[in-house]
Image (spheres, grey):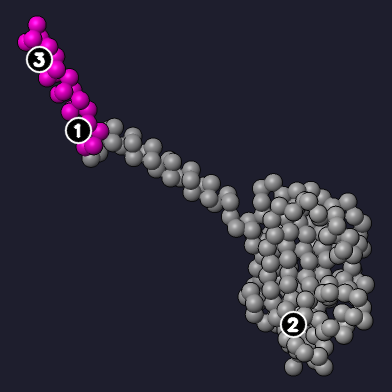
Amino acid sequence: MRVLWTVALVFMLGAVALFFYVLVKPNSPIQQEANMLFTDIGNTESMAQASEARFELTSSAFEHNTAIPARYTCDGEGVNPPLSISGVPANAQSLVLLMEDPDIPEAIKKERGIAVYDHWVLFNLPVSTTVIGENSKPLARMGVSSNNAQAYAGPCPPSQYDPQEHRYVFTLYALDGMLDVPEGSTKTEVLAAMEGHILQETSLIGTYARK
């Protein structure tokens, strides 16, 4: 019996050794299957990361925190700059775009009772939007700016006040639904309707000083 047990044990050890040899042997069928499995896992992870691309707002006319060309201001044509949108969350239902000047003079803040100057208010922008072209009318509802116009208002910092260079903050919001507010709403009304519905937000800042 001891001889039979010894033979069986040797046979089992040999089988285990053969299995591990085939498993780690380069280009063996088992090793190839393992490589394919790990490759598939890596590809799946890469696809998941790609699907979670960063939500971003950019412009081909200026970089973040750099000067906005005069063409897009009151010293030029006063048309809106081109903007690009990427990485919109998959569960978003609409977009909101606001452009604000937080550097308006204290005198104007007190005179008009405002904290920032609203230059552009767009809401219910389709999530499929990837580009807002220069001097365009996006497929969206337009709110009113601080000059009570339903249009883009280009940068126009008053040169008699400091600071002479102002920041212009373009903020893009991804929402979980459409906003039930009418065309011509104020930014305050739009922000109130957005409350509790913001999925993500991103900003692009441009600067401008009149010569």
Which residue, given by chain and number where applicable, does mark 1 sit on?
21
Q: Amino acid at mark 2?
A: His
Q: Residues within 10 Å of mark 3 (few under 14, many from 20)?
A: few
Q: In the image, is 23 to the left or to the right of 196? A: left
Tell me how far mark 2 sits from mark 3, CA to CA.
88 Å
Q: In the image, is 61 to the left or to the right of 161? A: left
The dominant secondary structure in magenta is: helix
User: In what element is the residue under mark 1?
Assistant: helix
User: In what element is the residue under mark 3?
Assistant: helix
- Which mark, residue 166? 2
Query: Closer to us: mark 1 or mark 2?
Result: 2
Tell me how far mark 1 sits from mark 2, CA to CA.
70 Å
Residue 60 quadrant: bottom right
Query: Closer to us: mark 1 or mark 3?
Result: 3
Q: Residue at x 39, y 43 (%)?
A: 39
Q: Residue at x 85, y 57 (%)?
A: 192
Q: Quadrant of the C terminus?
A: bottom right
Provide residue 209's location: percent of width, then percent of height.
Answer: 73, 87
Tell me how far mark 1 sits from mark 3, CA to CA.
22 Å
| Residue sitting at the far top | 1
| N-terminal label among 1 and 2 | 1
Query: Closer to us: mark 2 or mark 3?
Result: 3
Which residue, given by chain and number where applicable, does mark 3 sit on?
6
Which region shows up in magenta?
A: 1-25
Q: Amino acid at mark 3?
A: Thr
Q: In the image, is 8 to the left or to the right of 135? A: left
